[in-house]
Structures are given as structure tokens and as C-alpha cells.
Image (cartoon, rainbow, N blue to C red):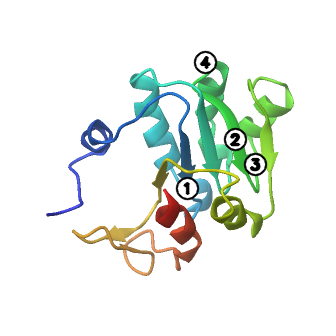
Amino acid sequence: MSKLRKNIQVLLDELALCDGMVISFHHHLRNGDYVLNLVMKEIAKRNIKDITIFASSIFPCHAPLVEYIEKGIVTKIYSAFISGPVALAISEGRMQKELVMHTHGGRPRLVESGDITIDIAFVAAPTCDNFGNLNGAYGKSACGSLGYAVTDCHYA
């Protein structure tokens, strides 16, 4: 059976999304990574609240998160790096709960130690086969190794 879905709406219909979940994202495509925006837009449409974002990095392209922070859809963020409008909104005190900054290597330790439990992991990958195997070496958005996301995918 194929693990591919027609679109994000079909995928999210199959997932048991609920308030208070921890959702992880990776920044392989850096300031060109719109997977976080795509997923969070659909979560907001479903009126799911109190989401903790466990993002390896947040860039200016993730500006739509500001609205979700202000509406209580996103209430907490873990990240190693944040810049742009999201960083400004957090520094102005617009997020309900805390921001947890960690080192790049501290991210997998947080997961493996159980300090954070990921409910669902989303990975921006340039290519994927029917079995869900991701690859960053090919495709128009080739970005290299996706190994950094292994811990999140394994523990989610």
C-alpha cells in the first residue's frame, strides 16, 4: 500500500490531530521551506489549538506563524534558531507559553531522553517513493542528507 497521499488535506484527515500536540518540522530547505506553513494553515482551518512547534529552525518565510501564535493555535516553540517576524513576535511577548532554545545537537537529545514527545513529524523532502522513503539527493529542491530528521521520524 502506498504511503503517498493526494494532498495535505487527505493526509491530515487520516491523522488523529488534536489540541495540545507536539509537531516537528525540519529546515532542510532553509528560508525556502514552506512545509511548516502548509501544515499549520490546515491545522488552523481545523480549529486545533495549543500546538507546540518543535522546529529545527524558523526563518522569515515562516511569518504566517505569527498569526497562529496570536490566535493561540501555536502556544510554545522549541528551536535552535529563529529569525524574522516570528522572532520579533516572540520577543514582544505575543506567545502564550515559553520559547525553548536549544543547541543543534541538543535537539535529538531532547527527543531520545523523553524530555519532549513528538506526536507527528513533517519533513520537507525533495523526493519520496511509494513506501515513504525520503531522499534529499535528487529533485529540483535537492538539499543533501536528510539524516538530521531521522530521530524525529523514528520517535514520532
Would you call the spot at circle 4 few (<14 residues within 10 Å), some (14-19), or many (20 or more)?
Answer: some
| Residue 55 on image: x %, y % | 63, 51
2 or 3: tag closer to the N-terminus: 2
Instruction: Please identify the quadrant where the N terminus is shown.
Output: bottom left
Name the residue tied to disc 2: 77
x 66%, y 56%: residue: 114
Would you call the spot at circle 1 few (<14 residues within 10 Å), some (14-19), or many (20 or more)?
Answer: few
Q: Is residue 50 above or below residue 154?
A: above
Residue lying at the far front in this picture: please name it.
114
Name the residue tied to disc 1: 32
Please tell me which residue lies in front, 115 or 83: 115
- Inter-mark Cα distance, 3 to 1: 14 Å
- The kind of secondary structure element at disc 4 is loop
Name the residue tied to disc 3: 82
Instruction: Please indicate whether residue 124 sits to the left or right of residue 105 in the image.
Output: left
Would you call the spot at circle 3 few (<14 residues within 10 Å), some (14-19), or many (20 or more)?
Answer: many
Mark whose residue sits in front, 3 or 4: 4
1 or 4: tag closer to the N-terminus: 1
Name the residue tied to disc 4: 71
Residue type at mark 1 is: Gly
Badge 3 vs badge 1, beta-carbon distance below 8 Å? no
1 or 2: tag closer to the N-terminus: 1
Q: Is residue 141 above or below residue 83?
A: below
Mark whose residue sits in front, 4 or 2: 2
